[in-house]
């Protein structure tokens, strides 16, 4: 099996269709399963152009695949596992997947770029052909430039491939992301040096509750911290603090390291892999950041604060 991972930069509705329409129609003509996840405006454009052929396409507004990087990577892999057997011999499972970049904080942008690079490793043993569109009308120019580092090739017409000279080996790109210094814990953060996982859970649950998280949410954060600490192996230093909209749990292990650059992005299966617990931790947090350096490893877990959680719940109704 051979996977393909491309970026497509477009600056108009016409340019988007010139790429997306041939990619989808060629796939349908060859019997490839096709999924399109993009903006509602682009779905409407493509649907009008496809006409009745659109009934053969799996589609969703891009936000439906999840706010978290792990949700997105998992969705792609599950789609491949579900539809892959239907692909003809030598064919592909085609995915056109457009991330949303506007309004993201720098740390969130870095996490999504890390995931984009990691997809080259996560999908390498599949027959997925993925094109990731970047709308240069709305995306930061730096985001568009980095797309050439996280995708081996570009496509303008959904069929051809142009190599990206800027493409960076995923292990090197992810190492760059993980070398960025973590958020600095404030002086008044709750801190403890714990030697057992039980002690860590008690500490995290207690202080998260004191910061206003519900018993369920405090318990979920303690479970996520448990998985992280188990991977790094105690003893670890753990710190908790609240900032605008979020609570951060900081787990520090001097001499520790997360060796697999894409650990925790695919759900555990029957073959246990080191780092499987990170997948569980990623499910329970808005964002999980890994910071490797020569001194060791820091993993920071970010969850909504109590007030942010209340705001999210109120928007559902």
Image (tube, helix red, strand yellow):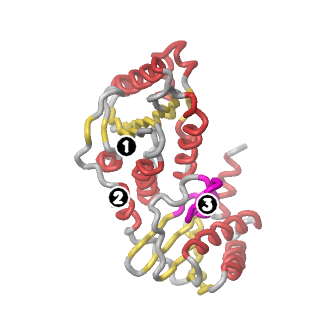
Residue appearing at x 49%, y 74% in the figure: 298
- Farthest-out residue, front: 89
Residue appearing at x 48%, y 28% in the figure: 89
Q: Mark 1 = which residue?
A: 139
Q: Is residue 64 visible?
A: no
Q: Is residue 145 magenta?
A: no
Image-based side of 104 in relation to 201, left or right? left
Question: Comparing marks 3 and 2, which lies closer to the viewer?
Answer: 3
Between 268 and 143, which is closer to the camera in this rendering?
268
Residue appearing at x 46%, y 17% in the figure: 29
Dot 3 or dot 2, earlier in sequence: 2
Dot 3 or dot 1, earlier in sequence: 1
Look at the image and tell me in which quarter the N terminus lies.
top left
Q: Is residue 284 magenta?
A: yes
Seen in the picture, residue 253 relative to 101 is either above or below; the reply is: below
Dot 1 lies on which element?
loop
**Circle 1: is it few (<14), some (14-19), or many (20+) Cα within 10 Å?**
some
Q: Mark 3 = which residue?
A: 272
Q: Which residues are magenta?
A: 267-288
Question: Comparing marks 3 and 1, which lies closer to the viewer?
Answer: 3
Name the quadrant containing residue 27.
Answer: top left
In contact (CB < 8 Å): disc 2 and disc 1 = no
Dot 2 lies on which element?
helix
User: Which of the labelled discs sits on residue 190, or is there none?
Assistant: none
User: Which of the labelled discs sits on residue 173, or is there none?
Assistant: 2
Residue 316 pos. (x, y %): 70, 45
The count of marks equals: 3
Q: CA distance from mark 3 to mark 1?
A: 38 Å
Q: CA distance from mark 3 to mark 2?
A: 26 Å
Dot 2 or dot 1, earlier in sequence: 1
Image-based side of 5 in relation to 312, left or right? left
Seen in the picture, residue 118 relative to 228 is either above or below; the reply is: above
């Amino acid at each position: 099996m051979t996977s393909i991972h491309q970026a497509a930069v477009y600056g108009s509705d016409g340019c988007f269709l010139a790429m997306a329409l041939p990619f989808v129609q060629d796939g349908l003509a060859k019997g490839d399963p096709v999924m399109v996840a993009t903006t509602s405006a682009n779905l409407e454009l493509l649907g009008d152009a496809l006409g009745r052929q659109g009934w053969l396409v799996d589609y969703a507004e891009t936000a439906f695949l999840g706010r978290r990087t792990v949700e997105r990577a998992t969705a792609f892999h599950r789609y491949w596992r579900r539809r892959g057997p239907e692909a003809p011999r030598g064919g592909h499972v085609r995915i056109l997947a457009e991330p949303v970049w506007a309004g993201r904080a720098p740390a969130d942008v870095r996490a999504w770029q890390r995931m984009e690079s990691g997809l080259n490793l996560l999908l390498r043993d599949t027959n997925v052909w993925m094109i990731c569109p970047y709308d240069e009308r709305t995306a930061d120019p730096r985001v568009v430039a980095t797309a050439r580092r996280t995708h081996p090739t570009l496509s303008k017409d959904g069929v051809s491939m142009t190599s990206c000279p800027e493409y960076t080996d995923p292990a090197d790109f992810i190492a760059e992301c993980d070398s960025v210094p973590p958020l600095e814990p404030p002086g008044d953060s709750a801190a403890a040096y714990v030697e057992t996982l039980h002690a860590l859970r008690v500490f995290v649950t207690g202080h998260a509750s004191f910061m206003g998280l519900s018993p369920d949410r405090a318990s979920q954060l303690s479970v996520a911290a448990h998985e992280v600490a188990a991977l790094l192996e105690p003893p670890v230093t753990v710190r908790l603090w609240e900032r605008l909209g979020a609570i951060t749990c900081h787990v520090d292990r001097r001499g520790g390291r997360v060796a697999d650059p894409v650990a925790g992005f695919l759900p555990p299966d029957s073959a246990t892999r080191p780092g499987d617990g990170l997948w569980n931790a990623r499910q329970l947090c808005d964002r999980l950041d890994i910071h490797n350096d020569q001194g060791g490893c820091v993993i920071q877990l970010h969850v909504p604060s109590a007030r942010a959680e209340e705001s999210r719940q109120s928007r559902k109704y």
